[in-house]
Image (spheres, rainbow, N blue to C red):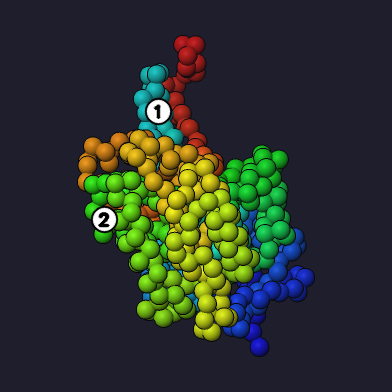
Amino acid sequence: MAKIYKNYINGKWKVSGNRETFENINPANTKQVLGRFQKSSQGDIDEAVKAAKKAQVKWGKIPAPKRGEMLYRAGELLLKNKESLARDMTREMGKVVKETRGDVQEGIDMAYYAAGEGRRLMGETVPSEMPNKFCMSVRMPVGVVGAISPWNFPIAIPSWKLFPALIAGNTVVLKPASDTPLSAINLVKILEKSGFPPGVVNLVTGTGEEAGLSLIDHRDVDLVSFTGSTDTGSLVARHCAKGMKKFSLEMGGKNAIIVMDDADINSALEGVLWGAFGTTGQRCTACSRVIVHKKIIKKFTSLLVERAKKLRIGDGLDEKVEMGPLINEIQRQKVKKFVDIGVGEGAKLLAGGNYQKGKKYSDGFFFQPTILGDVSPKMRIAQDEIFGPVLSVIPCKDFEQAIGIVNDSKFGLSSAIYTQDVNRAFKAVENLDTGITYINSSTIGAEIQLPFGGTKGTGNGHREAGTASLEVFTEWKSVYVDYSGKLQKAQID
C-alpha cells in the first residue's frame, strides 16, 4: 500500500480536512506509485495562512542574522542528504540523477547565499537637504507569501522563493506542483529540522484549481510568487490585481542559440544538445530554437542529428542515461501534437518525432529527441513554447538577421551566441531582448547569485535569485531622523 504524506501546517504534519488524497507516480515507470498526497481544500489553505500570519509577527522581529543561521543549517542538511533527495526527485519527475543532484545543489547554494544576506539586507543612507537631519532607507518584510512552484525544479525553485522570503522576515505557505509533492515535502522536513518556528513555513499539496487558487485569492496572503506557464501566470496576475496584492511571475520561454560561421562547432554542438535535451527539454530556459549561419548550417545540422540520435534514453536513475521521460501523458501528447503541426507547416523531420519505441519504454512517458529542419521564424513551432525535447533549426544569413529572429518572440527569458568575435559577442549582449544571455555557452545554467527572469511574456519585471530577489520579498521604508530640535519643513524651508 502506498505511503500517505501529510500537509505541514503550524509545525505539525496533518491530513487534509476533506480526507481526500491523490497518487504520485514515477513517469519512467507508471506502475510505481511513490505515495498518496493530500488534496487540500479551502479549509486547509485558511488554516495554513492563519498560522503564517500569526507566526510572522514574531518571526519578523527575530534578527536577520539569526534567521540566517537557520537557513545555513538547512543548507548543511541539504548537503548531507543530497543523494537521497536527488534520487527521490528522479523517481518523481524523471530527469536524470546527475541533473537532480544539480537541482538539490541549487537549493544548497541558495541556502548559503540567503543566510549571508541576513548580515546585509542593505538599504541606503543619503544626505539630507536640511541641516541636522539624517536620511536612510531600510527593508521591511511584506508579510505572508504564497509560493506556487512548478514540477521541473522541485527543490531548486521552491528554495529560490522560500529562502529569500524567510531571510527578509516573511512567513510562507508553499503549494508545490501536484506532479512533484514529494520533493517539496522533503525540503520542508529539512527546514523543520533546521529550527524554523511553527507557522513560519507551511506546506499544502493539491491541485492548482482548488488549493492554488484558494491561496492566490486569500485575503491574508500579501504576496504571490509564481513560477509556471504564461497562461497560468496571466490568471495569477488577474486574481492578484483584484485584491491589490503584490505578485511575482516567472513564466515561459522560447529560447534560442545563435551559431555564427566563426563558432567553435564542437562546443556549439554540445551547448545545443544540452540546452535542447537536458531535462527532456522541460526547462523554461531550454533551447528550442537554434539559429545557424547559412555557411555552416548543412554541416552543423548533420552533426547535430547524428549526436541526437545517439542520446541514451531511459530511467534517470541509470547513471548512463542522458535523457529521461516527459512528466506525464498529457505533456507527451502535447509534444507529439506540436511535432505534427511543425511537419504540417512545412518543417522537415530530421530526427525523432514520436514516442520512444521498445518494451522497456512502454511503462513510461518517453519521447524521442526531435529535430526539425527548414523551419521559418513565423512557424508555430518557432513561436510557441513546447516544453519537450523538440529543437527547431532556423537558417540566418548574418548576425543582424539572427538577432532579429531571436527577438521575434513573445518571450524573452534566455539567449546564447557562439562566436569567436568579441565585438559581435558584446553587440549580442546589447541587442538580444532577453533577461539572460550566454556567450559561448548554452541557454541553461543560471547561477543563484545573479538575477533570474526575463522580458516580455516571460515575467512581470521581477527577478528571482541574487539580491534582486529581495526586491520582491521586501518593502522599502524611508526613515528621516531630525535632531535639529525644531520643526523643519523640508522643501518649504
Q: Tell which of 383 and 127 is nearer to you.
A: 383
Q: Residue at x 42, y 32 (%)?
A: 136
Residue 324 has which mark? none
The secondary structure type at the circle numbered 2 is helix
Please state the horizontal and vertical placement of residue 341, each as a whole percent of the image: 58, 55
Residue at 75%, 70% in the rendered image: 17
Relative to 182, residue 135 above or below: above
The vertical placement of 58 against 491, above or below, is below
- Residue 38 in picture, x, y percent from top left: 68, 72
The answer, for residue 215, to whether it is visible in the render is yes
Q: Which mark is residue 134?
A: 1
Q: Amino acid at mark 2?
A: Ile
Q: Amino acid at mark 1?
A: Phe
Numbered label attached to residue 265? 2
Is any atom of residue 331 visible in this view?
no
Image depth: mark 1 or mark 2 in front: 2
* Left or right: residue 423 compared with residue 149: left
Q: Nearer the viewer, residue 265 or 287?
A: 265
Label 1 element class: strand
Work out whether residue 64 or residue 25 is closer to the camera in this orientation and state it.
25
Q: Is residue 292 above or below residue 133?
A: below
Q: Position of residue 211 (x, y in %)?
A: 69, 60
Q: Which corner quadrant holds the N terminus?
A: bottom right
Q: Is residue 410 above or below residue 15?
A: above
How many numbered marks does the figure carry? 2
Q: Residues within 10 Å of mark 2 (few under 14, many from 20)?
A: some
Outermost residue toward the right in this view: 18
The numbered mark, 1 or 2, whose residue comes first in the sequence reads 1
Residue at the farthest top position? 493
Residue at 40%, 28% (x, y): give it. 134
